[in-house]
Amino acid sequence: MQKIVYFNSKKLIKLMFMKIYKKYLLIVFALLFVSCSETSNSENLTIGTFNIEWLGDGIDDNKPRTEAEIQQIADIISSSGMEIIAVQEIENEEALARVVSKMDGYKLKVDKQKGKQKLGIIYKNYIAVNEIGEYEPLSLNGKTRTGYIVEAKKNDYKLLMMIVHLKATSRFDSTEALRIESRMMRHAQAEILSHWADSVMNTGVKELTIIGDLNDYPTRKNNQTLEPIINNPNLHFLTSDLRSCKNFYWFLIDHIVVSTETLKRFVPGSVFVYDFYDMLPTEEAEQISDHCPISVQLKIR
């Protein structure tokens, strides 16, 4: 069984840093986990995903945040060790720039789809990212969000990335008919992603990932919507058994799916959930996001 690594900061803090004031906790975390972004490890590549829950540009935001809270988001990403981070629920490029401007050595790109929940990517400045663009078929004729395709390159290794935020089944689906419709839409998106991956691999591109918020989990027994991806022999979930950092009784809906060739590069035991809910008071953690960053390492040499 794949080893899943959670950061249990409470035990560590109690043992080593009981008297440290809470505003320094993120700094302590950064010192404990030396980021591979600082060492530019040529052997591995660390990729991850983070839904930053309604990240706004500071003007009439759906979820207003102070500059101190933006700084906390930046500190979490910077100290996570991720070199490439797929991000979701970004209002616009200015919103993501609020975070990245507080991070040394990172760049960003944001897609150009309509609406206030865009997709983006944050990456270390030694990573080359080629923006391919929005993948319209995933929007189901404008009913939901598109995909966002980029090609990332570290040293001589190239990875094609499909960044996604699939249709949710939320509290706004107030009737059974609406809930069924949302599940059908998400299933249709999963089928589109499965076909996309196969078509790309048929052209000779073997290294790829589908990464982001899939709004479902592959171990669900009833009303499973990700079957087309689960049943595709060329695609593999690296994050099947992860639990939500906000509520351990929930399965995680953020995922990293890779092709068979990319699976061969997966470093066993490298799945990581940055559990800042375990680190911060609940009211502070909720101002960061209702999701936590997840990451994996790929051996690129």
Image (cartoon, rainbow, N blue to C red):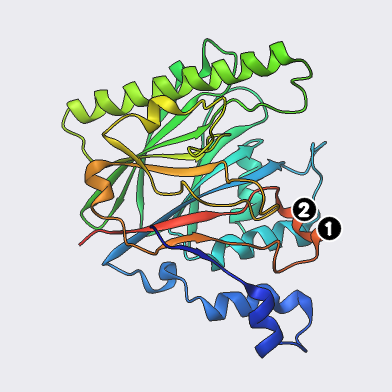
- Please, which residue is most extreme toward the front here? 221
What residue lies at 61% left-to-right and 63% top-to-bottom? 76
Q: Image height check: is 33 above or below 96?
A: below
Pointer 2 with pointer 1, Cβ within 8 A: yes
Quarter of the rendering containing residue 17? bottom right
**Considering the image in quadrants, where does the C terminus appear?**
bottom left
Could you say whether the residue bearing mark 1 is in a helix, strand or loop? helix
Quarter of the rendering containing residue 159? top left
Residues 284 and 67: in front is: 284
Could you say whether the residue bearing mark 2 is in a helix, strand or loop? helix
- Residue 5 in picture, x, y percent from top left: 49, 65
Name the residue tied to disc 1.
Answer: 283
Query: Which circle marks residue 166 in the picture?
Result: none
Tag 2: Cα neighbours inside 10 Å, few (<14), some, or many (≥20)? Answer: some
Task: Specify whether 171 is left or right of 298.
Answer: right
Name the residue tied to disc 2.
Answer: 286
- Residue 171 in picture, x, y percent from top left: 77, 27
Three-letter residue code for mark 1: Glu
Task: Specify whether 206 is left or right of 248.
Answer: left
What residue lies at 24% left-to-right and 42% top-to-bottom? 260
What residue lies at 78% left-to-right and 53% top-to-bottom? 287
Question: Could one spot residue 299 in this view of the protein?
Answer: yes
- Residue 2 in picture, x, y percent from top left: 39, 58
Residues 151 and 190: in front is: 190
Q: Image height check: is 27 above or below 17?
A: above
Three-letter residue code for mark 2: Glu
Q: Image height check: is 256 above or below 146?
A: below
What residue lies at 49% left-to-right and 61% top-to-bottom? 272
Question: Could one spot residue 124 in this view of the protein?
Answer: no
**Considering the image in quadrants, where does the N terminus appear?**
bottom left
